[in-house]
Amino acid sequence: MRQRLLLLGIDAHIKTLLRQTGPALSPFSAWVLLKGLETLPLRVERQTRSAATLADFLAERVEFSQVIYCGRADHPQADIIKRQMSGGSTLIAFELKGGKAAAFKMMNALELIRISNNLGDAKSLITHPATTTHQRFTPEERAEMDIGDGLVRLSVGLEHPDDLIADLRQALSGLS
């Protein structure tokens, strides 16, 4: 009986979802999705190469207490990553020494890279997890997840890495 009631509850949610969103993609949305999948490997390869370049640039900077990029040899799980992946990632995380104030100042000074709470696009996007994706967690819970107030995440897009480095360099120059 309890399982039946549980299924009825799920069923009601699914019916509401289907009524509000429809049971399938529109033909145009499906076509756009398929067209995007044709070039996905090329885009991800380019974005991954650019992310590796940016991670190396950021790792040399004194403004950060850490730079986390799975394609670097200093990543804590580098051995596992080498065995399981053919490259790095399009995502870089880094912790600014000045905490939230420094993170916001740097992010607000960016001109090419856009602030967003969603990551993963053809354009480079940056977010501050403590005030977006993880805002509902307590500071103690975020600390357990290594999400400090100075942590930002950068999703690298298709822009030329030299342009992204120039944008980051000028944004970081305002911190000193």
Image (cartoon, rainbow, N blue to C red):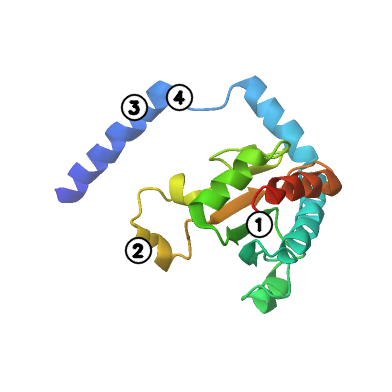
| Residue in front for this viewpoint, 101 or 76 | 101
Q: Residue at x 66, y 20 (%)?
A: 28
Q: Position of residue 5 (x, y in %)?
A: 18, 43
Q: CA distance from mark 4 to mark 3?
A: 8 Å
Give the residue at mark 3.
Answer: 16
Give the residue at mark 2.
Answer: 140
- On the rendered structure, is 25 left or right of 137? right
Give the residue at mark 1.
Answer: 92
Rendered-image quadrant of the C terminus: bottom right
- Vertical position of residue 171 compared to residue 82: above or below: above
- Could you tell me the amino acid type at mark 2? Glu
Q: Residue at x 42, y 65 (%)?
A: 143
SS state under label 3: helix
Q: CA distance from mark 3 to mark 2?
A: 37 Å
Q: Nearer the viewer, mark 2 or mark 4?
A: 2
- Could you tell me the amino acid type at mark 3? Thr
Ranked by sequence position, the earlier of labels 4 and 1 is 4
| Residue in front for this viewpoint, 92 or 43 | 92
Q: Tell whether label 1 touches label 4 (CB within 8 Å).
A: no
- On the rendered structure, is 46 left or right of 89? right
- Could you tell me the amino acid type at mark 1? Ile
Q: Quadrant of residue 120?
A: top right
Q: Nearer the viewer, mark 1 or mark 3?
A: 1
Ranked by sequence position, the earlier of labels 1 and 3 is 3
Give the residue at mark 4.
Answer: 21
SS state under label 2: helix
Ranked by sequence position, the earlier of labels 2 and 4 is 4
Q: Position of residue 154 (x, y in %)?
A: 64, 50
- Could you tell me the amino acid type at mark 4? Thr
